[in-house]
């Protein structure tokens, strides 16, 4: 009973009959393990095709051998009070358990025991499970424990900084707004800030329509805050050398082992907004129309309406937010007016493309803002016969590169990192990635002809990947950010 399949999330269900099987069964994307004491029940569950182990559920060694860790979701469905209390006590003594969901047949006025009333044990009536779903309740228990931890970090702090990336996207802005709401704060006690500024028309439209303020600050301003929260970003993304941060919440792959008071990084999620929606739900926080609109738009843009990098949790969050959101405002955000000065850039981009194999390359010289690069990359991917779009431009003495694909070939983040990380920062997701390369990092010849350098480097790595790299595993993401 000491086996463990990788380091992924597991659902571990303690039971004394077959009822939990009908709620959870075989989860399609995660490992499900049933534990029971009755060997006959074990055999019946195994015959149903699920993984089941038997042992004394009140024995702590059972859970030690299972190597239970904080990512595991623990559900207890034991009808006998003595067996239930014994199992809970053994689980709580196993310090790696974050939270436990105790499923009870019905609510009762009977006084709860010391273990069933423990802060890390959340009781859920089966009638609630029928309404919301077994897995959803397990997830809510873990999120509720995380919310308690988060609030304890901030309760005695006068000012908190919600820091997002340069030129923050809707997912980052929505996550910061949700974090402020979760903590019960306002613009003064928890401002949203960036070292850069918001430039993309659709993001500016979001801020205007939803009346969200994002402040541009300098590194020295961080000293004014008792707590610093990074949302939809990690310390390694910043050019500035950050002081120690206190909280990191992100859905991009972890790029450094940052030490902080609270860290929740879920690269299998499609959006950070999904994580924050789960926090709000678990903390029983009322979501206003404004916040629902922001979060829905954050999930929508980061997952391309649930078509890219999305999982069941994203779909669940999206479905929950959809009835509450203002869809007229979202339509206005999605179709902002294009600045007149961008017309000449667009004209050049579509007049001078280069196509090699199934990759389209577009290079733009001096730009007035860098966000036009991913905008054009998204558009170029729609060209017939194209599998990859690689668009670049020079902004502020740096080459900004955006890569796009349909997510059916090799990872964009992996290829961009292999091609350009030795020259600057590079990485991203399976279907979208970014690189920023200082011109000073290139030799004189390449700096003088960045278009040829970029095309040559990417094509070398791309062709080598087609020959040598194993197929990309579904659900696995690579590298830093993709914008």
Image: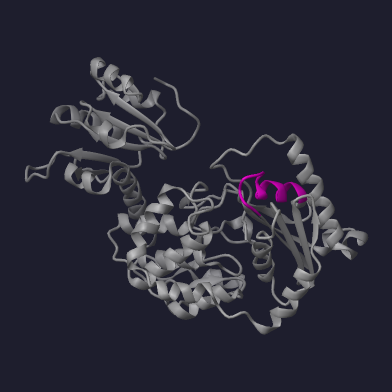
- As rendered, which of 251 and 406 lies closer to the eye? 406
* Front-most of residues 447 and 238: 447
451 in relation to 464, above or below: below
Q: Say above or below: 342 vs 37.
A: below
Q: Position of residue 386 (x, y in %)?
A: 71, 54
Pick the front one: 104 or 359: 359
Residue 313: x percent and y percent? 41, 50
Task: Give the residue furthest to the right.
Answer: 445
Q: Residue at x 62, y 57 (%)?
A: 482
Q: Does the magenta stretch include residue 409?
A: yes
Residue at coordinates 31% horizontally, 57% vertically from top-left? 281
Of residue 455 and residue 351, the one placed in the foreground of this image is: 351
Image coordinates of residue 349 in percent, x first then y, are 76, 70
Which image quarter is the C terminus in? bottom right
Q: Quarter-wise, where is residue 178 in the image?
A: bottom left
Residue 281 drawn above or below residue 376: above
Report the quarter where the N terminus lies: top left
Residue 276 visible to an observer of this rendering:
yes
Left or right of residue 162, residue 465 in this image = right
- Which of the 4 quarters of the picture holds residue 4? top left
Residue 472 location in percent, x, y? 62, 39
* Image quadrant in which you'd find residue 54: top left
Q: Is 415 contained in the magenta span?
A: yes
Q: In this view, does 25 lie to the left or right of 404?
A: left
**Residue 299 located left or right of residue 132:** right
Furthest-bottom residue in this view:
340
Magenta span of residues: 405-419
Residue 227 in sight in this render: no
Q: Is residue 473 left or right of residue 59?
A: right
């Amino acid at each position: 009973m000491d086996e463990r399949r990788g380091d992924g999330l597991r659902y571990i269900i303690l039971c004394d009959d077959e009822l939990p099987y009908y709620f959870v069964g075989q989860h399609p994307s995660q490992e499900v393990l049933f534990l029971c004491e009755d060997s006959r029940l074990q055999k019946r569950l195994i015959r149903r095709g699920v993984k089941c182990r038997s042992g004394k559920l009140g024995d702590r060694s059972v859970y030690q051998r299972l190597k239970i860790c904080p990512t595991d979701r623990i559900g207890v469905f034991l009808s006998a009070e003595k067996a239930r209390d014994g199992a809970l006590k053994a689980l709580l003594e196993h310090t790696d358990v974050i939270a436990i969901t105790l499923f009870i047949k019905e609510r009762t006025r009977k006084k709860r025991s010391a273990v069933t009333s423990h802060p890390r044990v959340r009781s859920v009536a089966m009638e609630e499970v029928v309404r919301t779903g077994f897995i959803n309740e397990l997830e809510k228990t873990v999120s509720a424990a995380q919310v308690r931890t988060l609030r304890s970090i901030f309760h005695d702090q006068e000012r908190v900084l919600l820091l997002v990336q340069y030129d923050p996207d809707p997912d980052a802005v929505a996550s910061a707004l949700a974090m402020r709401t979760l903590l019960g704060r306002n613009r003064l006690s928890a401002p949203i800030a960036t070292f850069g500024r918001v430039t993309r028309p659709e993001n500016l439209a979001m801020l205007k329509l939803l009346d969200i303020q994002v402040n541009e600050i300098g590194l020295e301003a961080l000293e004014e805050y008792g707590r610093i929260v990074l949302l939809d970003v990690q310390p390694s993304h910043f050019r500035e050398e950050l002081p120690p941060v206190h909280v990191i919440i992100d859905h991009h792959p972890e790029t450094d082992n940052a030490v902080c008071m609270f860290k929740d990084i879920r690269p299998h999620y499609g959006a950070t907004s999904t994580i924050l929606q789960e926090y709000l739900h678990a903390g029983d926080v009322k979501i206003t129309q404004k916040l629902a609109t922001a979060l829905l738009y954050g999930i929508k843009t980061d997952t391309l309406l649930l078509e890219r990098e999305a999982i069941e949790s994203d779909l669940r969050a999206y479905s929950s937010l959809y009835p509450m959101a203002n869809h007229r405002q979202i339509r206005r955000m999605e179709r902002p007016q294009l600045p007149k000065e961008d017309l000449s850039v667009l004209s050049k981009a579509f007049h001078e493309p280069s196509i090699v194999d199934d990759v389209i390359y577009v290079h733009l010289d001096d730009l007035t803002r860098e966000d036009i690069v991913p905008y054009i990359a998204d558009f170029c991917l729609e060209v017939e016969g194209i599998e990859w779009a690689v668009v670049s431009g020079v902004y502020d003495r740096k080459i900004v590169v955006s890569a796009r694909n349909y997510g059916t070939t090799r990872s964009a983040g992996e290829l961009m990192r292999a091609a350009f990380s030795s020259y600057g920062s590079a990485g991203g997701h399976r279907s979208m990635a970014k690189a920023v390369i200082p011109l000073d990092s290139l030799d004189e010849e390449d700096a003088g002809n960045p278009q040829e350098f970029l095309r040559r480097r990417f094509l070398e790595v791309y062709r080598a990947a087609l020959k040598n790299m194993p197929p990309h595993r579904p659900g696995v993401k690579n590298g830093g950010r993709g914008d």
